[in-house]
Amino acid sequence: MREILLAAMIGALLAASAASAQGTAPGPATPVPPAKAAQPKPADATTKSEAPSPEFARYLETLWPKAQARGVSRATFDLAFQGVTPDPKVAVVGRAQSEFAQPISAYLDGAVSGGRIRRGGELARQWAATLDAVEAFYGVPRSVVLAAWGMESNFGGYTGKNSVIRALATLAFSRQRAGYFERELIAALEMIEKDHIRPAEMLGSWAGAMGQTQFMPSSFLAYAADGDGDGRRDIWASVPDALASIANFLKEHGWKPGLPWGFEVVLPEGFDYAVHRRGFAEWTTAGVRRVDGAEMPRAGEGLLFLPTGARGPAFLLSENFVVIKAYNTSDSYALAVGHLGDLILGGGPIRGAWPKEAPPLSRDERVEIQRRLSKRGLLDGDADGRIGFKTRDAVRRFQLDRGLLPDGHADPAVLKELRASR
């Protein structure tokens, strides 16, 4: 019912837009049909003629009862895995994700490019009526929806050419986060069982992310939406479906309408870096000002974010920043989405200067920092080399304990201090 209402809203707004154009144009307006993203050609690696190894065949047989328990028929199971063998080219998951490995300034330079900003602006105008309806229906601003679309698939320009079934089966069989990828593989089988897509057309990234939204199969089942009212949830070829699906994902993860994701700020002289979380009104009282001159939100709490420490740009983040991280847990990614969306709609650049950083920490060094913080009782959880809010908070507590400037920035100096301390 919700999707029928959304499709009706989009249809009404498109009709109103066409009527307005006819009233102001010198001649009759010719409606432009909604553009469809180009369907990727099936990858050569979708199936292989050679027989799978005995080990892989045995793995698939252990998978069958689990798939059956989720309502997958034997016919669907056999069709999906017909001729499928492990893909030797599938990368080890997460080892080289640029949003975790690159310095944030370099990551933003690539992610928030001039070409992507211009393309986003063009698409904002082309799909204005659809975005009006999506924003009204889900409460998620078009800036964030457009930016996530741009970040995930370059606005549908690249959705992946790998067989999702083969990629997920390879990753589940490899034992690298096997449980996670096995659950996604079974969700992909559910998609086929429910006639959302045929196996040969289920193409995506090497890790199984699909379509213009780059949803994993479980996210498709939970959040994909029918934005154009054709009765299907087509995140591969339908732009309205992709935009509605992104907005629905963010809404269901707790997006708060009317609250920005965050913004760049200027900190006053003598600022107390030990305080990094307080209400927006309290930040104003403490002398913190928005770079764009706008007022602070009237409600909500702001988290101080110093991506490169006290010497670089400063941001206040709202809880909606955490919602963006449901799409990708990297702080760099979420900042890129927020900043790209602002720029697409005419916002200004980041004004704070990025400092010339020391060579970035290697993954092993980031893991070492986390392990040393854990040994000191400052950090819970696995040492995965991904520096996020929890690690930054732990670094800040360590800095306070050592009498250092508590900006929460994990860098070579912090690692040196951790090694030197007992």
Image (tube, helix red, strand yellow):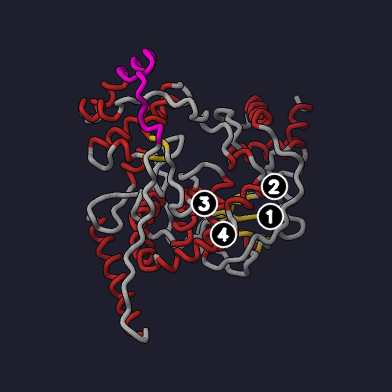
> Can residue 320 be seen?
no
Disc 4 element: helix
Q: What residue is disc 3 on?
A: 321
Q: Foreground mark, 1 or 4?
A: 4
**First-in-chain label (2 vs 3):** 2
Q: What residue is disc 1 on?
A: 313
State left or right for residue 199 relative to residue 393: left
**First-in-chain label (3 vs 1):** 1
User: Looking at the image, which residue is at 28% across and 58% down?
Assistant: 228
**First-in-chain label (1 vs 4):** 4
Disc 3 element: helix
Q: Which residues are magenta?
A: 44-62
Labelled pair 1, 2 in contact (Cβ < 8 Å): yes
Q: Foreground mark, 2 or 4?
A: 4
Q: What residue is disc 2 on?
A: 308
Quadrant containing the N terminus in the rendered view: bottom left
**Label 4 to label 3, Cα distance in Å?**
24 Å
User: Looking at the image, which residue is at 46% across and 35% down?
Assistant: 206
Residue 115 badge: 4
**First-in-chain label (4 vs 3):** 4
Q: Position of residue 309 (x, y in %)?
A: 71, 47
User: Which of 135 and 161 lies nearest the eye of the viewer?
Assistant: 161
